[in-house]
Image: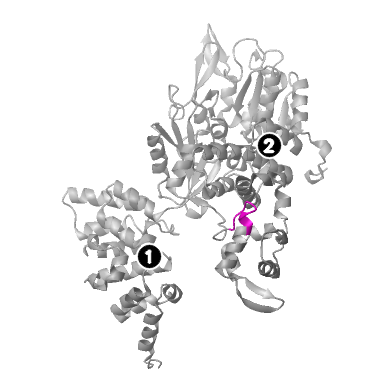
Amino acid sequence: MSTADTTLEETVTLSQAKTLIRSAAQEQSFLLLSPPGIGKSDLVRQAAADANLPCRSLLGTQIAPEDVSGVPRIVGERSVFCPPRILLPEGDRPFCLFLDELPASSPDVQKAFYSLLLERRIGEYRLPAGTWVVAAGNRAEDRALVRTISSALVNRVIILQLRLDVSEWLSWAEEADVRVEISEFIRDCPEALLRPVPADPVPHSTPRAWASLSRALNLAEQAGVLNEEVLLTLVSGRVSQEDVQAFCNWFQAVQRSPQVLGIGYTKLMKTRIEELDLSNVAIQTLKSHGVYELGQLVSKDVGHLRMMNEMSGARIRGTIDQTRIEEISGAVRNMGLNLREVPEDPAPTLTLRQAKSLVQAVGHRESLLLLSSPGIGKSTVVRQAADEQQMNCRSLLGTQVAPEDVSGIPRIDGQRSVFCPPRVLLPDGSEPFYLFLDELPACTPDIQKAFYSLLLERRVGEHPLPDGCVVVAAGNRSEDRALVRSLSSALVNRVFIINIRIDHSEWLAWAKSQNIRSEILAFVTYMPGSLMRQAPAEPQPFSTPRAWESLSRSLDLAEQNSAMTPEIRRALAFGTLSPEDASLFCAMAEESLDDLLPIEQYLIDPTKLPASATARWFVIHRLRTVVQRGELLKLRGEQINEFLLAVPSEMRMALLIDLVEPWSELGAADAMLRSLHQVTGLAHAS
């Protein structure tokens, strides 16, 4: 029978699996298989706790084959192997031995477990009578970087294929104090509890993900950082994309109107627009554009509404005005929801400052993976977060270790070997600290798998991290041409993926506090796009916040050593920045950039424009950017027109080209009309 023909009779629920383990695990070894995140680890620990057995857990991806038998020592004229204490503690008390991620282990490690799984033996040592041996892992179709399981291993265990039972999970969620918004959402949309593993390494909905999201929402709320942007980022970083907007809408509705809990998500979204507090004109307009239910309405943003036409039959009366939009928005708010102000971002992002606050709020309970283009300051912001919380930050570059290095080096302690983990991962003492795993997406698959228990359980081998430790990973994305690898679904399901964006004003404030050179501050102020350029196809320098900081230090050192010349400046700039930024920065370096004024002052008084043609064109470029982004402070139309007519015609045309609409919104119609007459030579209209 094929995998596609698998029936429910060939699988067991988590509670059924727990019953089977309790009844037979003292004599039979079990291998639990399922998609990531449905709760295999918790199931085994709960079963062991119910039987009053201590549970010892080992991640198969963290050890080498020779570690299983133990470290040899000389006794008389013979060598005796001292097995690992984590596999076989001293004494004869039975325990539960949990071999996690067994299918992800190397073939040699799998073979090293043969006698343990079948004969309950490690070398010459036997496990205490009554000891359980339970293994777990994911399947090949789960895209979890698993390996082929040998037929010899399969023949030594009872394989249990697990399935998820929604009612079981809801009962557990109530006992575990999972947020009511989540449990009620799953009750109404049970398919959202476990989505198929996606082809790409992106977050997907699992029981573990929903439980983790519940904890993160609680912590962010307690820290006062849970706004709509953080909510969307947390949800997007943990569950399937198809569940993100639906849950965010539901969560916000419950927060604003708790009574909607009694309605349920599905019924709320199916509320017909006739039931909303809307005028007949608004109702007919929405219907004419295919909007009949509340769920269809909240999927749109304000821009969609502005594009709608009020229709009566086939006759167009005009576009929806702001009054009608406010009417619709108010009716939606009465149901606990909001219309989106902007179209939905497929990849919600946070600024570095927001990411820092989120790390400080939830990082001691939930692991986060910060993703962005290279050089925007992820490492720096993690260290700042640690400093502000007066905690040490220990950093490990994942590309510098082997899988077995994560668990540590074994030493003999009595009759057992004990793994001594790396001090960078687990320092001496019990003080909490920040653990920063840098370049995680660049690690090999085996290294990624070695970090599973560290990211999820805050554990290195048998050693738990001190309470309060913050675990943060970081890296780049595949589109950044940074030699990253594909993340396994099992790793993605253990972390919150937080996409980071650079914020121009945040960086300038930070740069001033770090004494970044004034000409760099002025240049980046006037050329905001130069702060972060896209990574080029070829391996050549490109502008990033890190690059500008590096250039500032290099120029300072050149000046301190009396080595600054135009040639040195060019060499440093072109060796650090994107070519277009390096050339313009060097050209402007002698133009007294420090003397440039805020752009609004030139608009109010055009006589203050720089005398230098180069500096003038620099100001013009900045003004185009400000107008294009809609960042210009509100000035009177007369002032706008006076400024445009005061600058030379070639500069005026450079300002207006491709920006007719935004200049019109600023009240520049008169200046544009006079410019048109000037260019065409046509006489003024009477």
Which residue is depicted at the point 52% across and 40% down?
Answer: 220
Q: Tag 1: residue type?
A: Leu
Element type at marker 2? Answer: loop
Which residue is depicted at the point 38% across and 81% down?
Answer: 670
Residue 300: x %, y % from top left: 62, 61
| Residue 439 showing in the rendered view | no
CB of mark 1 within 8 Å of CB of mark 2?
no
Residue at numbered disc 2: 38
Q: Is residue 148 magenta?
A: no
Which quarter of the rendering shows the C terminus? bottom left
Answer left or right for 483 relative to 27.
Answer: left
The residue stretch that appears in magenta: 331-339
The image shows residue 102, relative to residue 410, as above or below, that is: below
Label 1 vs label 2: CA separation? 52 Å
Element type at marker 1? Answer: loop
Residue 513: x %, y % from top left: 30, 46
Q: Tag 2: residue type?
A: Ile
Residue 572: x %, y % from top left: 27, 55
Residue 428 is marked as none
Q: Residues within 10 Å of mark 1 (few under 14, many from 20)?
A: few
| Nearer to us in this view, 532 or 356 | 356
| Residue occupying the far left of the picture | 562
Q: How is colour applied across the structure in the image?
A: one colour
Residue at numbered disc 1: 633
Residue 223: x %, y % from top left: 49, 38
Which residue is depicted at the point 26% across and 52% down?
Answer: 517
| Residue 573 showing in the rendered view | yes
| Residue occupying the far top of the picture | 76
Mark nearer the N terminus (1 vs 2) = 2
